[in-house]
Image: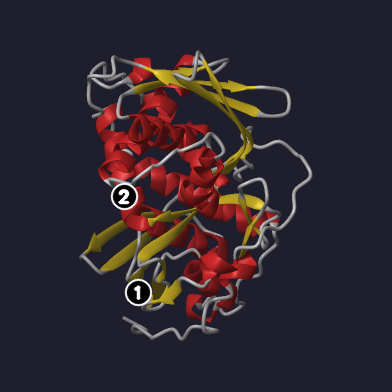
Amino acid sequence: MSRFFKRIKSHDGNYDLSSRWVHYSNGLILDSKNSGQPVWMVGSIWFEKWFHSLEDKLELSLGKRLIQASSEELEYYLLSNRIFAPKNNNIDDWKHLIMDFHQKGLGTFSFYGEDGTDVKLLITDYSNINIAIGYLSSAWEYMSGKRYKSSWADSESSILLTLSPSSDTFPPPVASINLSQHRREKSVSNSSEWWEMLSLGSEGCWYIQNSRKLIISSDMFEKFITSSIPFIQLNRKSRYDNYKWNDIDASNSTWWSASAESSRELFILQSFHIMIREIKDWKKVGYNHLQKTGLGAIIDVENYDDGDGIIFTLHSLFHPSITCGILLACWERANGRNGKLEFTKNENHFSLKIFSGQSVSEDIS
């Protein structure tokens, strides 16, 4: 090996997180360094459980799909923002990339060595193995101008990533289309209370309310969906009939339903207490469980069907499946019974209708 692991020092005390990930009044968190790209500030453990639940419901292994999405997202980010790589091709000197990796909560990395034509990178304290591998594989390709195949050995706290030269060629990635936000006037919202709960762990590890956070960009999420859909097979045992996605094709509907149901189940398991005394209390529920992490904001809420159902209005969403699954879980926690959800995209807003899916005597599951 020509070089060995080198410890990377953080560039400032808090990685400038609050300036990078900016909360807005429409309930989104936007990336100030990437053209206002919407991001989801999710707990890394929550995301991992959601991911494995999604795999189970779709009866698919999706690790490679997530690696691909992460790789394509970073390549597009580097190209579109014209990010300069170090001229000496030493990834340890790439300050912009190191800071980006830390700000996204991915852990830290360093050049580990070479073995013939193979390159080895060490990733430590990683929050998500697939995202980290896709990210650094893409970064090395961008820096070197060559394509590589990746393999790795991992432990609980580190990954030794091996990149082997490849003759494969791929077209440059393009931006994903996010149809889940309307271009309306929005303003920066006060998120100081949120960032006051920030605590730092090891390099590239940061926490809000003792939950390690991971940044998922809208572009990566949409690329993950697109790469997954061709392989979908429906698992009839899931509660897909409880979700109706108006004007969404069958393949996307299946993916969205599996994602929403995974989100609903995880939220139910967290045993949050949802107390609704009057209808306006729903906006506070939306603030606590959606807006803080960039999933959207409840703009309006109204009862229907003699109060047995409810209609939420939102202007922007990170992705409908996550928001809908969490809101359905909130409604079920508040009402003590299972519900059904209908999602509609209107000209200038989104409508989420939730209503009873069973008799009151049945418990939620």
Residue at horizontal 52%, vertical 39%?
282
Q: Position of residue 52 (x, y in %)?
A: 27, 41
Q: Residues within 10 Å of mark 1 (few under 14, many from 20)?
A: some
Q: According to the image, label 1 marks what residue? A: 114
**Amino acid type, residue under disc 1 in the picture:** Glu
What is the residue that sits farthest to the front in this orientation? 277
Q: Residues within 10 Å of mark 2 (few under 14, many from 20)?
A: some
Res 283 seen here: yes
Query: Which one is in front, 77 or 262?
Result: 262
**Amino acid type, residue under disc 2 in the picture:** Glu
Which of pointers 2 and 1 indicates the residue nearer the eye?
A: 2
**Location of residue 297 (image quadrant):** top right
**Location of residue 170 (image quadrant):** top right
**Location of residue 301 (image quadrant):** top right
Residue at horizontal 67%, vertical 63%?
33
Query: Which one is in front, 186 or 259?
Result: 186
Q: According to the image, label 2 marks what residue? A: 48
Q: Position of residue 275 (x, y in %)?
A: 40, 42
Q: Is residue 101 above or below residue 182?
A: below
Q: In the picture provided, is 135 more to the left or to the right than 53?
A: right
Q: In the picture provided, is 213 more to the left or to the right than 11?
A: left
Q: Is residue 115 above or below residue 254?
A: below
Residue at horizontal 42%, vertical 77%?
200
